Amino acid sequence: METDKSYELCRVRERAAPGGGLVSITVETTAPVAAPGQFAMLRGPWGDAPLLPRAISYRGAGPGWARFLFRTGGPGTDRLARLVPGDEVAVAGPLGNAFPPAKRPWLVAGGVGLPPLAFYQRRFGGTLFWGVPTASAAAGLAEKSWRLASDDGSLGVRGTVVDLVAASLGELVNDAMAPDAIMTCGPYPMMAALARLSAAREIPCFVSLEGKMACGIGVCCGCAHPATAGVYVHVCEKGPVFPAHEVVL
Amino acid sequence: MTVDTTVTLAGVALKNPLMTASGTSGHGLELAPFFDLSILGAFVTKGVSMAPRAGNPPPRLQETPAGLLNAIGLENPGVEAFCAAALPGLATLGIPVVVNCFGEDPERTVAAVEALSRETAVTALELNVSCPNVKAGGIAFGTDPAVLRPLVEACRRATAKPLWVKLSPNVTSIVAMADAALQGGADALTCVNTLLGCDIDVKRRRFLPSPGRGGLSGPATLPVALLKVAEVHRAFPQAPIIGVGGIRRGEDALKYLLAGATAVQIGTAILVEPTAPVRILNELVELCEALGITRPADVIGAAHPGQS
Ligand SMILES: Cc1cc2nc3c(=O)[nH]c(=O)nc-3n(C[C@H](O)[C@H](O)[C@H](O)COP(=O)(O)O)c2cc1C
Ligand code: FES
């Protein structure tokens, strides 16, 4: 599933700010088509500060284009959010590995962990669960088929997305309907809870990590994350997707 | 006008003065998907030690205004694994391969130098003396001339390859350290390693990166590193110097040459833009053309009075 990586200046084709601090930009690219779970390092022409490019997951990709969805609120993402169609943005990608194939995957997203899983569902199918704090944080992006949970009950069921997944597993009438993999991206406590839930039911679980990165291309050793086997894994090189049991959450 | 970019650095011929900086370009061919590494004057590897090292816990990185604090903790696979896995690929590049190395005490430093010297694919060694010396309470070798000189002497005896010593800027007098390294037998001096610094997470009231401090690199550090190069060149005009710190444009590279460096290394700029060396080389050539410099090697140290 992994593809060749490239570095190029890309033209921004579309920009949307649906609300909730979320911004989506679509760029023209000649890079290989990204797979769901992969990410790119993005940086605009804004001088020496903020210095580092930002690691952003692909929300979608096809021949000649790629789409990114991210939440603003930091110096880098705020700058990226100001890009408008016609602007240039430097993109190194597609980077990292992808979520693995599965027959009946459950895709569980927490908050801004949505993009890689929404991308996965669009390309391969699967059941998508999305948890948000409130309806406003979802910014109208939720699709009809998705199963939704919000802390205040303003969107979908009230409660956490982990509770929703646990309840859904409990309601399954037969094993043939059970997921053969759970893939998740979101806050670490949420992913840890899902990993425990999956382990109890012997369902393979894959988590997408979001470490601090400088290069994103495996040259700086900056993105180390503790591994259950003892030492560290480099999120940008070996990940960002890992079998849940291999990493400390 | 054609620009002759070749330089000779302590007996090593380079087709141009640009190299990668240690720790920012991987151990082997990690950058190869992005540009043709053989355009470089030389490739400098991430630091290696005799035994593998796991490195520091996260967070290892902290962005600062126009800079980057890192506390990687010298993570590396060890000399043996490096020579087996990364070195053969580097050897195919057809450019000088410089291996950055270090040890936790003098014995292990010498052992690493010895082991790497047996490899024909290694052109030169760059000794990182900013590493803490566990036998001396964790004080870096490169902060005490009385420690540095015997260390370099011992490494000098252990290798017939060109030996570069990478100096730390975190000292009162870099000239005293340069003197110790040269007396110890260094062939060239890399000036300089990262500047110690820290940041603070105000919400959690914690120092960053994880060990409570890190090495500052990037554009913010250029004026400091440039002055260190100038000071060392002024004190030792014959000593070959490799300038490093904050280079992100051709003009920055030329400044280092004018300050007295024979060659330069590009670090953080590669993390920001993996193809940076290609652009910087083009910019350097264009700038030399614009300024009527036919051979950058001719302007080394030319900013110093009486040298232009
Ligand atoms: C992530 C990172 C890792 C580094 N690792 C090493 C290393 O292993 N050995 C070494 O001598 N210098 C190391 N350095 C220092 C660089 O080689 C260079 O001296 C410094 O970054 C200044 O150059 P720059 O501003 O162009 O990055 C490292 C720097 C960074 C940013
Ligand atoms: S971010 Fe540099 S190695 Fe992963």
Image (cartoon, coloured by chain):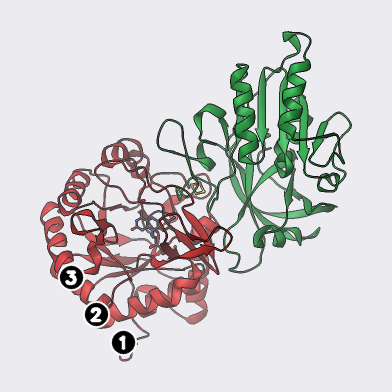
Chain colours: A green, B red
Tell me the mark number nearer the camera, choosing from 3 and 1. Answer: 3
SS label for mark 1: loop
The residue lying toward the viewer, choosing from A146 and A5, is: A146
- Is residue B299 placed above or below B191 in the rendered structure? below
Whichever of callouts 3 and 2 sits on the residue coming sooner in the sequence is 3
What is the x, y in percent for residue A143? 86, 35
Residue B221: give x, y in percent of width and height. 45, 72
User: B36 or A186, which lies in front?
Assistant: A186
Q: Do the residues labelled 2 and 1 touch (CB within 8 Å)?
A: yes
Left or right, A240 with respect to B146, comes to: right
Pair 2/1: label in front: 2
Q: Give the residue at mark 2.
A: B237
Q: Nearer the viewer, residue A185 or A123?
A: A185
State the residue in front, B64 or A93: B64
According to the picture, the residue beneath numbered tag 3 turns out to be B145
Label whose residue precedes the other's in the sequence (2 or 1):
2
Chain to which the residue tagged by mark 2 belongs = B
**Chain ID of residue with mark 3:** B
Residue B115, given in percent of the width and then of the height, sits at: 19, 44
Residue that carries the numbered disc 1 in the rendered image: B307
Label 2 CA crowd tier, 10 Å (few <14, some 14–19, many 20+):
some
